[in-house]
Amino acid sequence: MSASDGEPVRIDVRRGDPTPEELAAVIAVVSESYAQEAAEAIADDAPAESAWRRSARALRAPLRRGYGWGRFTG
């Protein structure tokens, strides 16, 4: 349930006796913070390259078949 859906938000006061103005201030701050977080929480469409693929890319060059072991042609 969120305030942006039009549904009421339930708030339980555990201690103290806040005034209606204090409750309104808390609701405004929490609602705005939630709205900003929800707006910024957008996942990327393309998956990120894994650390394994990034590190394995430059392990070694492909073998050249024309040379013998240790360039021994003898």
Image: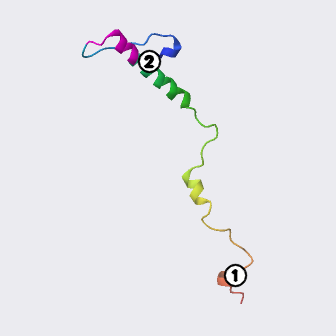
Could you tell me how far apart the alpha carbons at marks 2 and 1 are, in whole angstroms? 75 Å
Instruction: Find residue 22 and report its image quarter.
Output: top left
Residue drawn at x 52%, y 14% as measured from the top left: 5
Instruction: Find residue 40 and report its image quarter.
Output: top right
- Asked if the stretch drawn in magenta spans residue 24, the answer is yes
Q: Looking at the picture, how far across and down is residue 60, in whole percent?
A: 62, 67
**Identity of the residue furthest to the front in this view:** 21
Q: Secondary structure at mark 2?
A: helix
Above or below, 28 relative to 59: above
Near-viewer residue (33 or 61): 33
Q: Amino acid at mark 2?
A: Ala
Contact, mark 2 vs mark 1 (Cβ under 8 Å): no
Residue 68's tag is: 1
Q: Secondary structure at mark 1?
A: loop
Which of the image's four quarters has the C terminus?
bottom right
Q: Looking at the picture, how far across and down is residue 25, in whole percent?
A: 39, 17
Residue 31's tag is: none
Residue drawn at x 62%, y 63% as measured from the top left: 58
Q: Is residue 39 left or right of residue 14?
A: right
**Residue position marked by numbered label 2 in the rendering:** 28
Task: Point out the tag, 2 or 1, that comes first from the N-terminus.
Answer: 2
Instruction: Find residue 30 and report its image quarter.
Output: top left
Q: Is residue 43 left or right of residue 64?
A: left
Residue drawn at x 30%, y 14% as measured from the top left: 13
Magenta region: which residues?
17-25
Residue drawn at x 68%, y 84% as measured from the top left: 71
| Dominant secondary structure, magenta | helix
